[in-house]
Amino acid sequence: MTAVRAAENRSNSFDLTFEGRSPEDLTELAMRIALFGEPNPLGGMSFLARADNHLPGLGGLGLSEDSF
């Protein structure tokens, strides 16, 4: 069984940690998965590190690279 833990932070909301990964770690992992196509190592809990990559859709708009 994997450990999922919620810890109260200063803003009275909850931060989720999973297998020792902080919210910042999970965000970084989600970005690496979405932007670079890295595999998601979280298995059944992969939804904890999930983000959509909207960059491919911008390619057809004819924007300059500076816009990205």
Image: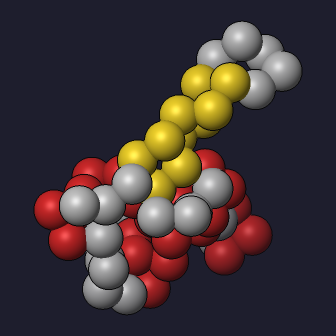
Find the residue positioned furthest to the top. 12
Image vertical order of residue 68 relative to residue 39, above or below: above
Find the residue positioned furthest to the left. 44
Query: Which corner quadrant of the image does residue 36 belong to?
Result: bottom left
Give left or right: position of 8 versus 39: right
Give left or right: position of 39 versus 28: left
Residue at figure coordinates x 54%, y 49% from the top left? 17
Instruction: Say which of 35 and 23 sits in front.
Output: 23
Instruction: Say which of 12 and 68 sits in front.
Output: 12
Residue 22 visible within the image = yes
Residue at figure coordinates x 37%, y 87% from the top left? 38
Residue 56 visible within the image = no
Task: Quadrant for the C terminus, please.
Answer: bottom right
Query: Which corner quadrant of the image does residue 33 belong to?
Result: bottom left
Give left or right: position of 66 versus 4: right
Q: How many marks?
A: 0
Q: How is the image coloured?
A: secondary structure
Image vertical order of residue 64 relative to residue 39, above or below: above
Image vertical order of residue 56 relative to residue 11, above or below: below
Residue at figure coordinates x 46%, y 56% from the top left? 18
Query: Which corner quadrant of the image does residue 43 belong to?
Result: bottom left
Percent from the top left, x then y, of residue 2?
Answer: 31, 60
Find the residue positioned furthest to the right. 10
Percent from the top left, x then y, of residue 22?
Answer: 63, 56
Instruction: Say which of 43 and 19 sits in front.
Output: 19
Percent from the top left, x then y, of residue 28?
Answer: 59, 67
Instruction: Say which of 62 and 16 sits in front.
Output: 16
Task: Quadrant for the N terminus, please.
Answer: bottom left
Residue at figure coordinates x 40%, y 47% from the top left? 4
